Image (cartoon, rainbow, N blue to C red):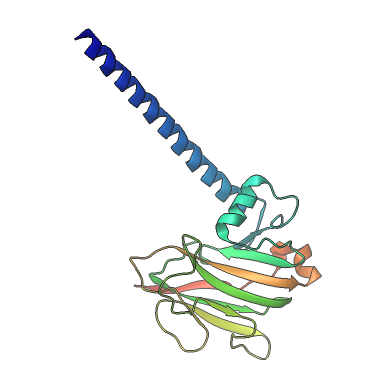
Amino acid sequence: MAADRRHGNRVRHALAVTALLLCALLVGVVSALLGVRKQFAAGGVRSGSWQTNANIGSSGAGPYLRAGVAMGGLLALNASETIYYTATTDDAGEPLSTACQYRVEGREPATRWWSITAYADDDFLIRGSNGRYSVDATSIEKGVDGSFVLRVGGEPRAGNWISTGPPDGGQPFSLTLRLYNPDASVVSDLRGVALPRIEREHCS
């Protein structure tokens, strides 16, 4: 009987230690992910709904920022080659949702080439977007002054349209604006760049 109790105590002790180690691991993973997200946005520069970090792709990027770049799937070129702006909210500060339709309005930025791409919350292209997940400087319809209006949402549209797929109860998504070979004036003033406005039209 005493031997059974000792065995039972050892088993309970082992289970308690295992549970403690699992909790510590979980806390560590969560804190690391939060650190990655905070660092990716920090240092950051915000222009309207869009944010970027001047250290992306540079030697000044710390481990958390490098991890954020890897998780986000960016190519991580330095700012003189490519600038990456990401928006997770509209201009009213509301999170972007696949349940809503958006109007993205702006003018061509001072850069050799650019694109806007929609990504699901897991940083992959949105499933169900039927290939309509991106527009770029050569595919978008624009005015003679370089202005354009882009619709983003699940409702099919003619012309400039990025699909976010079925509403799926309203899943979060993000937009990434890439500026390739940006003008020196853009690189020197990331906050002052006139970027597209993102306005929510309606939600289902």
Rendering coords of residue 150 (x, y %): 53, 80
Report the residue at 61% width, 78% height from top: 106
Q: Is residue 49 visible?
A: no
In-front residue for pair 28/15: 15
- Outermost right residue: 184
Q: Quadrant of residue 163?
A: bottom left
Left or right placement of residue 193 versus residue 12 in this view: right
Left or right placement of residue 163 versus residue 63 in this view: left
- Outermost left residue: 1
Left or right placement of residue 203 versus residue 71 in this view: left
Rendering coords of residue 153 (x, y %): 44, 76
Rendering coords of residue 86 (x, y %): 58, 64
Report the residue at 41% width, 84% height from top: 156
- Outermost top residue: 2
In-front residue for pair 130/113: 130
- Seen in the picture, residue 141 relative to 23 is either above or below; the reply is below
Q: Quadrant of residue 129?
A: bottom left
In-front residue for pair 190/199: 190
Q: Is residue 134 visible?
A: yes
